[in-house]
Amino acid sequence: MNCDLHNSIPDWIIEYPETTAVFAELRLDTNCGGKSLEYVCLQKELSVRDVMKKLQNTISSVQDGTE
């Protein structure tokens, strides 16, 4: 995985388009003004760990062909 908590949501979507569904489910603004994923999660009072797990699971399922 090339993206981490310091990348913005648009960076995640560019690198892993399948994550768009996760951001929509969590109601995270995909045009977050370049703020980091960590910052956006903290502002929305979401668990950074849980969000990362969802993203990793989504990416893994697509890479494994199990989506």
Image (cartoon, rainbow, N blue to C red):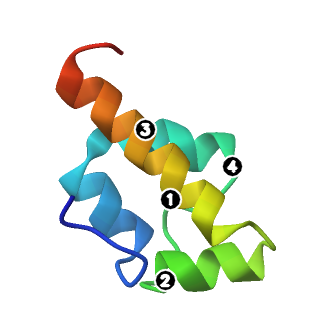
Q: Specify the amino acid type for callout 4.
A: Leu
> In x, y percent, where is residue 7?
34, 78
Left-right relation of 58 to 17: right
Establish if 47 lies above or below 7. Answer: above
Given this view, does label 4 or label 2 mark the residue nearer the observer?
A: 4
Instruction: Give the labeled residue for mark 4.
Output: 26
Q: Specify the amino acid type for callout 2.
A: Gly
Of the image marks 3 and 2, the number of the one nearer the N terminus: 2
Q: Distance between the residues labelled 3 and 2?
A: 25 Å
Q: Quadrant of residue 34?
A: bottom left
Q: How far apart are marks 1 and 2 (CA)?
A: 20 Å
Are circles 1 and 3 on residues that touch, CB within 8 Å? no
Are circles 3 and 2 on residues that touch, CB within 8 Å? no
Q: Distance between the residues labelled 1 and 3?
A: 8 Å
Other residues around mark 3 within 10 Å, as few (<14) / some (14–19) / many (≥20): few
Instruction: Give the labeled residue for mark 2.
Output: 33
Q: Specify the amino acid type for callout 3.
A: Asn
> Which residue is pictured at 71% across the width and 81% down the height?
42
Given this view, does label 1 or label 2 mark the residue nearer the observer?
A: 1
Q: Identify the mark at residue 57; answer none if there is no mark.
A: 3
Left-right relation of 44 to 6: right
> In x, y percent, where is residue 63?
19, 29
Q: Which of 24 and 38 is in front in this view?
A: 38
Q: How far apart are marks 4 and 1 (CA)?
A: 12 Å
Other residues around mark 4 within 10 Å, as few (<14) / some (14–19) / many (≥20): few
> In x, y percent, where is residue 9?
43, 66
Q: Specify the amino acid type for callout 1.
A: Met
Establish if 13 lies above or below 41. Answer: above
Left-right relation of 13 to 23: left
> Which residue is pictured at 60% across the width and 65% down the height?
49
Q: How many labels does the image show?
A: 4
Q: Identify the mark at residue 52; answer none if there is no mark.
A: 1
